[in-house]
Amino acid sequence: MSRLVFLLNGPNLNLLGKRQPQIYGHETLADVERDCRALAAELKLDLRFHQSNREYEIIDWVHEAREIAGGIVINPGAFTHTSVAILDALNSFDAPVFEVHISNVHKREEFRHHSFVSLRADGVIAGFGTQGYLLALRRVARLIDDKG
Ligand code: DQA
């Protein structure tokens, strides 16, 4: 099983640390990437870390992952609640998928309670702050290790 993991971030997450810090915290996406790369090295995972504000780019990365990756960790941002296209792309990917939300979406507005991506995700982490990405990476590594 491939030890390559795609970690994908959707719209507005490039503003992490500046945007609504009372909800999303003070860490930047660069901080998150640094911590994820450090953990990936420890877990012997290869990491592709991407962010885009464009739906099609996220879909293209999922397509790229299809042939080569052992897992996907995705925070689709607001596309979580709107994108059948990202769900369809993830449904074409056979290895584990974990959905991460920095905030607890269930404690927030009603429109954030529904996730198209959750129809495919093998697990969902919400409300653990940016630590959620690290927990998801640990889970992917465990599943890859178990498969051998
Ligand atoms: C988010 C939650 C979404 O509802 C929101 O649109 C985001 C970020 C989170 O990480 O908590 O952009 O996915």
Image (cartoon, rainbow, N blue to C red):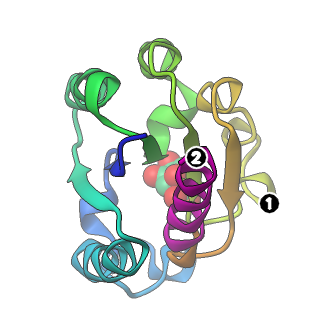
At numbered mark 1, what does the secondary structure look like: helix, strand or loop?
helix
Q: Is residue 1 left or right of residue 62?
A: right
- Determine the CA span between mark 1 and mark 2: 17 Å
Which mark is drawn over residue 99? 2
Q: Is residue 75 visible?
A: no
Q: Is residue 139 above or below residue 37?
A: above
- Number of other residues with Cα within 10 Å of mark 1, as a class: few under 14, some 14 to 19, many 20 or more: few
Q: Which picture quadrant has residue 71?
A: top left
- The disc labelled 2 sits on which kind of residue? Glu
**In the drawing, what numbered circle is on residue 40?**
none
Q: Position of residue 19 (x, y in %)?
A: 36, 71
Which residue is located at x 31 percent, y 54 percent?
A: 12
Q: Secondary structure at mark 2?
A: strand
Disc on the earlier residue, 1 or 2: 2
Q: Which residues are magenta?
A: 133-148
- Note whether ligand 1 is within 8 Å of mark 2: no
CB of mark 1 near ligand 1 (< 8 Å): no
Residue 63 location in percent, x, y?
28, 20
Give the position of the N terminus as an image quadrant. Answer: top left
Residue 10: give x, y in percent of width and height.
35, 45
Q: Nearer the viewer, residue 6 or 2?
A: 2
Judge whether 55 appears above or below 105 on screen: above
Confirm or deny contact between disc 1 and disc 2 (CB under 8 A). Answer: no
Is-magenta flag for residue 134? yes
The quadrant where residue 60 appears: top left
Q: Is residue 35 above or below residue 15?
A: below
